[in-house]
Image: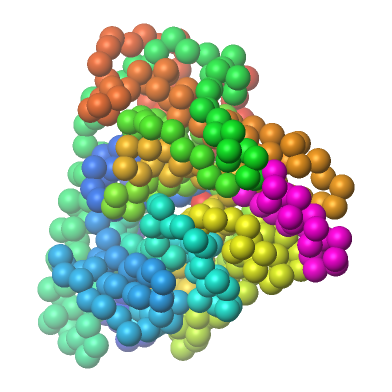
Amino acid sequence: MVLSIDQVMELSKTYNVIPLIEAMLADTETPIRVYQRMQKQPYAFLLESVDEQRKQGRYSFIGTDPLFILRGKNGVTVLHENGQQHAIQEDPMAAMKILMKRYRSPYLAELPAFSGGAVGYIGYDLIQQLEQIPRHRKDDLGMYDLHFMMVSEFVVFDHHMQQMQVVVNLHLPDEADEDLIQILYQEAALRLKRLKRRATAPLAQERLNDVDLAEHSITDTTLTEDRSARSAFIEKVKCAQQHMQTGEIRELFLSHRMEQPTYVPPLDAYRVLRATNSSPYMYCMKMDEETIIGSASESFSKAGEENEVFLTFKADDESIGDRKEDDFNQLLARFPSERLVGSPKLHAIHLLAELEDTARGTFGGAIGYLSFNGCSDACGMDQSIIFKHGKTYVQAGATIHKDSDPEEVYQETLNQALALLEKVETAAQVFRSNMIENRSISTRINPYPRFSHVNMDYFTMESMDEMERGTLG
């Protein structure tokens, strides 16, 4: 439903960001195909989740071409807009709050909670700015503490209605008169048509190699083990247990990172991950030189709520900015998850800064969105794969107790890392990606003839019928 100019005029009395929506039948499309059309851009995202009762979430969100990018690292905040970089005096969290308060957008019944807004992640190392925590000795990946794209145009995939909603936001300057609103409305309508064409552009047909995902196990994945790293990790486990003996901490979640060279396209690995993972949250996010794919079992934004799809707010206009700030503050109050640091939380964080030599980056952080209309959703990041500089990076950890066996703790982390790296190796076999040019180099056959090529984007097999994906949000 595209709002009429009269409706926009009325909404403009209260709001300065107004979404224009056009729905279209999507029974031959999938979120993967839509994302494929956008993934060549420097920034793009696909957010999905599963509704446990329905086995499939209602919405998927796919977008690209942000208005601007907000990045923060070590207390320095930079805004990237129109090809220019602007240093911001505020710290990253304050800058995000200020930026989000600029936007006032209605909560429309035709749209899910996300109506456009900030999409991205908060890295674990942001904790160093929230508390007096020393920095890790090394920061080899150089991940941002906060990295968000401000999205104004995107596609919503409504799985229940089998339709796509193409959304373009109309941004109104302060004191815009009716003539200017008319002009901006017409421009937004043209952008809506362009996005619709882009979201449905033809794609080259893809066929799969004859590989059975169900039979592929983590024993097929090899990881060159650094024995010195193993010994060092075990010593850290013993050190943590000494702190437990003195009563300083009760438990500690100790982690370390592993890496493998790869040129597997991240989307290929994501498709394998979404087919073999039952976690409620899934994400594939391209952030310039890095792409993050992953899954999560918990939400930061709806902790303690049951059977809710996302946080929603009534559109009582005057307090939208305050609600967005409150929601951001609530996210930070729960950050980082105690499950991924230990307890007591603050003592565990201090000890991790000492024992974990390398900065965690996104591991233990949160990824999701803050919507123009005041809604939000974010999930934890502990099952992620980072693609950067021709390598895949995975981080794995385990909870240590007084009586934990250090060797078993290390093996648990190794198994977790192998389980993630297996997704990448499986993708290389299934899609037979060209390791140099990221493209197909051989003729492929369809091992699952009962599925069309479109449905194979879900990568479902007879034993996986209930694992099709829905939305984050």
Q: Position of residue 224 (x, y in %)?
A: 51, 28
**Location of residue 327 (image quadrant):** bottom right
At x 63%, y 45%, the residue is 232
Image coords of residue 70 (percent x, y): 33, 69
Q: How is the image coloured?
A: rainbow
Q: Nearer the viewer, residue 437 or 138?
A: 138
Does residue 78 show up? yes
Up-down relation of residue 275 to residue 444 (above or below): below
Is-magenta flag for residue 135?
Answer: no
Query: In screen coordinates, is 117 left or right of 280?
Result: left
Residue 241 forms part of the magenta stretch: yes
* Relative to 418, 389 lies left or right: left
Residue found at x 19% / y 52%: 193
At 59% from the left and 64% from the top, the residue drawn is: 353
- Residue 211's place in the image compared with 81, above or below, is above
Q: Quadrant of residue 190 in the image?
A: bottom left
Q: Would you place residue 264 above or below residue 15 in this image?
A: above
The picture places residue 335, in percent across and down from the top left corner, at 60, 67
Q: Which residues are magenta?
A: 234-255
Nearest the camera: 4 or 272? 272
Q: Residue 29, can we see it?
A: no
Q: Residue at x 80, y 68 (%)?
A: 248
